Structure formats: structure tokens, C-alpha cells
């Protein structure tokens, strides 16, 4: 069996849906993307794509576009609440990580889809009730997925995680030519800052623990003054940067457990519809990109539901591990007790200086994984 000539419907034109559409189209399927919004768009914010996701973009022939749009990150620097540097975790030559404006990532993928003959239909709100007659339906309809309850049998809505993210973009006075991701750890909160768009913008994500999310929507415009007040415990670069924020949005972070089943009949979940997670490892979209490659490869190599079930088995295990690690970072980044925080940072700092290879190896399972190199007989 191959996907050649198959008729595939992808629900959702986010990173996961567009990447899946492209992976299937490149293997010869006839693909339509159904997006309920009137245009393909993304929030004004950044997205980190680590090496495990970059390998998929390269395998899809998007190297030039990724280099054009993505700022190459040198690594992750962990900082204390005062702004003092604690540890540097370089990406090194084998872990290419790029920092994109989300709108650029959508442009990159949708242009490639158009070239590969994918049809994108806008203003199309698809539900399990008005399902399409395609051979395969890929439900990449995000954390609030309409297909997830139908596929999994679990009617529960996504749960508020007790974390809220403030997102803002700030122009830089001079383009930054070299840099990476800076993470500032504070009590019950952290701030992530990185350059975008040839270093002309800085992306800020400020996360805080909070008990409730009372607002109607999932995100809302917020006040820069409130942002500064909520994060005034931070010194150094964060304290200097926050007064320059003019527009900021506040997001409630929601997630689910990884479901038992990702497949029902000819419908399969992909991306946040299957595994919305805390963004503290910057892997939600990267996992959707990996999903897309693995799903297309499994369906191409295995007839009928065997391909879908194989995809589910392989992805469930990996994604569950990533979600666990992302949740653990909430504790690592947000230590409330100042003495415990200083002790943990001392260990991190010493480890970074004396045995930098330990950090590198600790995340080998995540960043050195190459879904595009898996033998096609096993996927
Ligand atoms: C603060 C924050 C920072 C993050 N940073 C990173 C990061 O640095 N790196 C990373 O990898 N991940 C990051 N993530 C996670 C990442 O944003 C998500 O995992 C990713 O965008 C999910 O993509 P998706 O395509 O699965 O879903 P979505 O992007 O939500 O796309 C779903 C699409 O489906 C459409 N849709 C929904 N329902 C229907 C329907 N019924 N019919 C038709 N269309 C429909 C929606 O309009 C939408 O366009 C972050 C998340 C947050 C909140």
C-alpha cells in the first residue's frame, strides 16, 4: 500500500495540519486542508524549533526557507531571578535550533503546500458530525479539538494547567546578529526571551502560576503595566526589557492527558488535538512536526488501519515522555524557596562548568532523535 493517489483531508491549518498536508502531498497523496478561520494566521509570537523538528523541515526540502526565516539559536542560557547567568547549554554543531516568528512558519509551510498541490479551504468548520468522505481524515484541530472526544471517547474539555503565559514582541534598537534563548527563573514564574526576524525583534514569554483562569476566552489583551507588576521580582535584562512592551496578550495554558486511542475508523489525531502540553520544553509544535512525518510514513508503508495504529503506538510513547519532562520543568524553573532556588542553581552552574557534556547527553533522546532516518520497514 502507498499513499499515492489517496484522498486525504486535514482538519486545521496550524503548524501540525500544514506539515501533515505537506508530508502526504510529497508522497503523492491528493490533500485538502480545511481551516475554519477566514485566513491562515498565527499569533504575533515566536516559536522555537529544535533539531528534532528541524530535521523534518530539511527532509521536506525546506532548508533554504528555514534559514531565511529562522534565527539560528546558539543555545539556552539559564539565569537567576537577579539576571545573573547560571549556566549555558550550547546547541553545538549537531543540534540546529531555529527561532521563528509564528506567521513566518505558517507562510513557510503554506507556500510549500501550495507548491506541492495541496488545496487549502478557508472558512470550513468541520466536525465529526459533518465528516468528509475522504480515505483518511487527519484531525489537527488543536487543543480545543472537536474530533478528540469523538476519537478518544473522552468528553472532558482541556484542563487549565494553573499556568498563564504573557506574550509580547519588542523591537531591538540594533539587529542582534548572534544569540540564543535566555530563560530567567523566579519564584512561581519564569521569563523566556529570544531574538526573531534577523534579530530585529525580541520575543518575550512570561509565565506565572495562578490558581484560576476566569476569563471567557483562552487569551486576551492585557496591560503592559500589569505585566511589569507581575514580574517585578526580576532584575537584570528582564527589568530593562519589560518597560519597552507596548502590546501584550495573556494566555491560559490548557492541556490534556495523552489519550489511549488516537484513531477511530479513518480519523487520526495529530499535534495538540492528541497531546497539548505545557510549553516549558518548547516541544508542542515540534512534536506535531514529528507526528506529521511519522504518520505519512506509516500510512505509506502499511495497509489500512495498521499504519494508523503503528503511528499511534510510536508517537504515544515519545510524546508522553516529552510531556512529563515539560511538566517537570515547571518545578525546576519555579522554585519558590529562595534558599532551595540558589542551591539548585549552584548545582546547575557547577554542572554546566565542570561537566557540560552531562546536560548535552541528558537530552539526547529528545534532540538527537531523527524521525526521518527511521528505516521505512519499521515505520
Ligand atoms: C506560550 C506558548 C509558547 C509555545 N512555544 C513553543 C515553542 O517554542 N516550540 C514549540 O514547538 N511549541 C511551542 N508551543 C506549542 C505550540 O504552539 C503548539 O503545540 C502548536 O501550535 C500546535 O499546533 P497544532 O497545529 O496542533 O494546533 P493549532 O496551532 O492550534 O492549530 C489548529 C488549527 O485548527 C483550526 N481548527 C480548529 N477546529 C477546527 C475545525 N473544527 N474545523 C476546521 N479547522 C479547525 C484552528 O483554527 C487552527 O488553525 C507554545 C505554546 C504556547 C502556549
Image: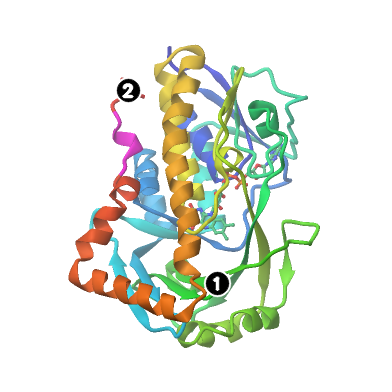
Which residue shows up at 43% across the image and 83% down it? 83
- Kindly indicate the quadrant of the structure image that contains residue 179: bottom left
Residue 373 colored in magenta in the image: yes
Picture quadrant of residue 169: bottom right
Residue 330 position within the rendered picture, expressed as x and y whole percent measured from the top left: 50, 62
Numbered badge on residue 189 = 1
Task: Name the disc covering residue 18, or none.
Answer: none
Q: Decide which of 311, 127 is in the foreground and name it.
A: 311
Query: Would you place residue 10 above or below residue 222 in this image?
Result: above
Q: Report the mark closest to the observer, 2 or 1.
A: 1
Residue at the right extreme, as displayed: 216
Q: Is 251 displayed left or right of 94 in the figure? A: right
Quadrant position of the C terminus in the picture: top left
Q: Magenta residues?
A: 369-374
At mark 2, the secondary structure is: loop
Q: Is residue 76 magenta?
A: no
Looking at the image, residue 14 lies above or below residue 97: above
In percent of width and height, residue 6 lies at 53, 17
Q: Is residue 207 visible?
A: yes
Residue ID for mark 2: 378
Residue 282 shows in this picture: no
Q: Secondary structure at mark 1?
A: strand
Residue at 69 percent across and 47 percent down: it is 39
Q: Residue at x 60, y 37 (%)?
A: 140
Task: Report if the beta carbon of the residue with label 2 is closer than 8 angstroms to ligand 1.
Answer: no
| Colour option used | rainbow
Amino acid at each position: 500500500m502507498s499513499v499515492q493517489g489517496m484522498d486525504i483531508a486535514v482538519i486545521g491549518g496550524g503548524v501540525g495540519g500544514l506539515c501533515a498536508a505537506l508530508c502526504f502531498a510529497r508522497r503523492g497523496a491528493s490533500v485538502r486542508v480545511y481551516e475554519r478561520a477566514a485566513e491562515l494566521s498565527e499569533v504575533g509570537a515566536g516559536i522555537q524549533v529544535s533539531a528534532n523538528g528541524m530535521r523534518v523541515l530539511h527532509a521536506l526540502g525546506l532548508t533554504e526557507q528555514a534559514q531565511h526565516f529562522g534565527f539560528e539559536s546558539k543555545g539556552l542560557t539559564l539565569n537567576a531571578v537577579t539576571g545573573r547567568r547560571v549556566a549555558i547549554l550550547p546547541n553545538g554543531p549537531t543540534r540546529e535550533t531555529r527561532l521563528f516568528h509564528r506567521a513566518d512558519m505558517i507562510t513557510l509551510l503554506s507556500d510549500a503546500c501550495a507548491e506541492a498541490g495541496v488545496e487549502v479551504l478557508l472558512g470550513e468548520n468541520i466536525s465529526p458530525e459533518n465528516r468528509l468522505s475522504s480515505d483518511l481524515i487527519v484531525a489537527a484541530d488543536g487543543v480545543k479539538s472537536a474530533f478528540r472526544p469523538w476519537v478518544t471517547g473522552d468528553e472532558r474539555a482541556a484542563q487549565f494547567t494553573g499556568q498563564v503565559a504573557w506574550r509580547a514582541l519588542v523591537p531591538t534598537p540594533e539587529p542582534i546578529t548572534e544569540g540564543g534563548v535566555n530563560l530567567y527563573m523566579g519564584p512561581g514564574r519564569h521569563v523566556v526571551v529570544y531574538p526573531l526576524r534577523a534579530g530585529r525583534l525580541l520575543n518575550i514569554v512570561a509565565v506565572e502560576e495562578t490558581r484560576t483562569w476566569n476569563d471567557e476566552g483562552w487569551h486576551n489583551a492585557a496591560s503592559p503595566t500589569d505585566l511589569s507588576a507581575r514580574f517585578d521580582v526580576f532584575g537584570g535584562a528582564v527589568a530593562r526589557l519589560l518597560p519597552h512592551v507596548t502590546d501584550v496578550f495573556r494566555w491560559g495554558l490548557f492541556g490534556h492527558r495523552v489519550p489511549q486511542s488516537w484513531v477511530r475508523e479513518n480519523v487520526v489525531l495529530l499535534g495538540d488535538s492528541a497531546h497539548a502540553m505545557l510549553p516549558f520544553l518548547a516541544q508542542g509544535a515540534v512534536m506535531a512536526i514529528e507526528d506529521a512525518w511519522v504518520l505519512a510514513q506509516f500510512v505509506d508503508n502499511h495497509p489500512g488501519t495498521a499504519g494508523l495504529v503503528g503511528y499511534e503506538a510510536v508517537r504515544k510513547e515519545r510524546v508522553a515522555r516529552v510531556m512529563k519532562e515539560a511538566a517537570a520543568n515547571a518545578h525546576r524553573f519555579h522554585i519558590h524557596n529562595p534558599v532551595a532556588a540558589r542551591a539548585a542553581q549552584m548545582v546547575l552552574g557547577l554542572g554546566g562548568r565542570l561537566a557540560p557534556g552531562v546536560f548535552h547527553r541528558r537530552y539526547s533522546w529528545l534532540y538527537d532523535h531523527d524521525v526521518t532516518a527511521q528505516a521505512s520497514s519499521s515505520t
